[in-house]
Amino acid sequence: MHRQPVLEFWYEFASTYSYLAAMRIEAAAEAAGVELVWRPFLLGPVFKAQGWETTPFSLYPAKGRYMWRDMEREAARLGLPFYRPKTFPQNGLLAARVALLGSDRGWTPAFTRAVYTAQFAECRDIADPQVITDILAALSLDAETVLAEAQAEANKLRLRRMNEEVQSRGLFGAPTFFAEDGEMFWGNDRLDQALDWAVTQARRGQWPG
Amino acid sequence: MHRQPVLEFWYEFASTYSYLAAMRIEAAAEAAGVELVWRPFLLGPVFKAQGWETTPFSLYPAKGRYMWRDMEREAARLGLPFYRPKTFPQNGLLAARVALLGSDRGWTPAFTRAVYTAQFAECRDIADPQVITDILAALSLDAETVLAEAQAEANKLRLRRMNEEVQSRGLFGAPTFFAEDGEMFWGNDRLDQALDWAVTQARRGQWPG
């Protein structure tokens, strides 16, 4: 008997295609028998390392215009609501810190979906601490305590270090998926391939239980 | 009765993902009942308009490294051979001029596939006129005459004008597909959606025969 294959799911809260992946990955992973590790991160430092001060969708207008249209079509195809936020990209730093804190406590998937829903289905600004507070409260969490812990030095540093570590593994965009052997898949369009890879590698017995 | 839906397929010979699309689009379009218009173009001027002197896969090494790995996986998944060419990006100017010439004569699809096969399956340099000559000869065409016509001022100018025209329609990468209503799809990953769109629009009777 083998243990369950594991897939790391790295996402940035401001990323439109990360939204599509985040909303459907749990059902897809369950169907494939894959265990997920949810990993919020920040694209800002990743883009800076490539010489960009902001998202390529802002730097390259033709690419940006296409992305919004593609998102409308892809969200419709996947049965997800999608509204273009008034601000883009939004600042997802606070949300990422909170999501990281939740990763040891089990509520990161639900929190993540709620943040994406607030941003892309309810047109709220996820940089607003009140929006995060409302989401935590709806999850029956003590928002004040969680926000304090999320913004404590240790958690901030942990997020920074995880960002650096994953960049050293080759990540350059979001969403990104890593299988246990380090195989990397980029983009919502590669979710199925990433799950297939994780399952196939596990079946080959490279990670016996 | 409606006439057959039409999809424009814009490709650059140096583009790896255009190769994946070119090798499978005819079977996919036939299965969907869609008529194809093959449109070779040059990414160089498109990238220049975005401030890039070469392909983003060279400008952004992390993205480039990932692309080669993703191509290996995707080619295997689609059952296509794939070898990384010694030179990348190759100069596809001559091939594009020849392919454009063939578009009124019916041999562009076969010529296009042969050029991609030479580059990505046989490790040949498509900038070498001898490679193009061999391909034309294998298609039972008079290579000398075709090459002279392809490099005549009228054909060169036509390619340049078509490039400018399609850029004005929003194209920013390759491959790109346009439906008859102007709807644009970018990337080999969107071939199925582009065909679906063409079929759905035609069924709605917006282009009655």
Image (cartoon, coloured by chain):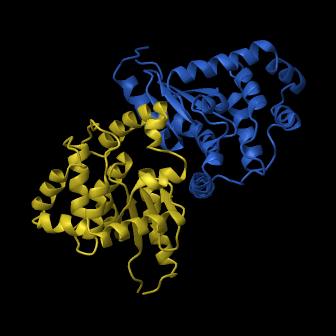
Chain colours: A blue, B yellow
Give coordinates of residue A24: x percent, y percent: 59, 42
In the rendered structure, the answer to whether residue B31 lies left or right of residue A78 reads: left
Report the residue at 59% width, 52% height from top: A67
Give coordinates of residue A120: x percent, y percent: 72, 48
Name above or below for residue B81 compared with residue A204: below
Can you see residue B81? yes
Name above or below for residue B207 compared with residue B128: below
The residue nearer to you, when weighing B92 against A96, is B92
Image quarter in which the C terminus of chain B is found: bottom left
Report the residue at 33% width, 59% height from top: B25
Report the residue at 43% width, 69% height from top: B161
In the rendered structure, the answer to whether residue A76 lies left or right of residue B88 reads: right
Give coordinates of residue A138: x percent, y percent: 83, 36
Can you see residue B174? no
Give coordinates of residue B26: x percent, y percent: 30, 62
Name above or below for residue A192 compared with residue B176: above
